[in-house]
Amino acid sequence: MVIEYERSIETMRGTHVNLPNLSVEDIASIVGTTKGGTALADVPKINAIFQKAMPAISFVVDLRYRQFEDILDELRQFRPVIPYLDPKDQAGHAFPHAVVVRGFDTKKQLVLVNDPLDTLRKPSTMPTTTFMEAWDDGYRHMVKLSVGGQKQLEPFLLEKKPMEVLQAARA
């Protein structure tokens, strides 16, 4: 879901990110997702693959108690956010769950999300109050997307002549 979002943002910007073509099942296998979900500590396992992308992408687990404004800051920079929620099922039992936040409708007070429990994989909405209650119960942790955090020399070296590489290294 994050990969799909990032591809759509890059298309909108007119840029291209060379992301690996992984299915949801591939990603679940890499990070060890079970029926109970994905543990926050396991999220960075996917970074080795995405740091080979151009530009490099990594998932950063943020265990600090965050504010809703932190999510909005990420969205303003066109970066999706994965908050860890603790919503309640129909019987009132809480369960750990993560969604991809894609946006916020200020007029309707709705959080726009992609929910992995939605088998149709379509964007959906949550009332802001429902989202905040579930996020509060989840200690307001989130996973952020870092884009371009790592320099990659190979494409640079392929574009430059040896003298240009040497001059750039000295600068």
Image (spheres, rainbow, N blue to C red):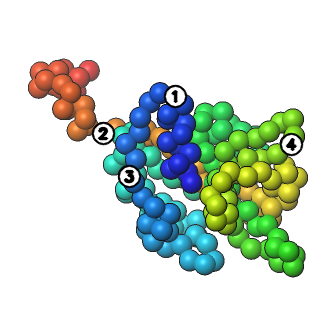
- Residue located beneath label 2 in the image: 152
Q: CA distance from mark 1 to mark 3?
A: 19 Å
- Residue located beneath label 3 in the image: 20
- Residue located beneath label 4 in the image: 109
> Foreground residue, 138 or 107?
107
Residue furthest to the left in view is 162
User: Which quadrant holds residue 22?
Assistant: bottom left
- N-terminal of the two: label 2 or label 3? 3
Q: Say whether residue 73 is visible.
A: yes
- N-terminal of the two: label 4 or label 3? 3
Q: CA distance from mark 2 to mark 4?
A: 41 Å
Q: CA distance from mark 4 to mark 3?
A: 34 Å
* 6 relative position to 91: left or right: left
Mark 3 is surrounded, within 10 Å at the Cα level, by few (under 14), some (14 to 19) or many (20 or more) other residues, namely few
Q: Say whether residue 51 is visible.
A: no
- Residue located beneath label 1 in the image: 13
Q: CA distance from mark 1 to mark 4?
A: 26 Å
> Foreground residue, 89 or 136?
89
Tell me the kind of residue under disc 4: Gln
> Foreground residue, 40 or 167?
40
Tell me the kind of residue under disc 2: Gln
Which quadrant does the N terminus fall into? bottom right
Describe the element under mark 4 as helix, strand or loop.
Answer: loop
Tell me the kind of residue under disc 1: Arg
Mark 2 is surrounded, within 10 Å at the Cα level, by few (under 14), some (14 to 19) or many (20 or more) other residues, namely some
Describe the element under mark 1 as helix, strand or loop.
Answer: helix
- N-terminal of the two: label 1 or label 4? 1
> Foreground residue, 34 or 51?
34
- N-terminal of the two: label 2 or label 4? 4
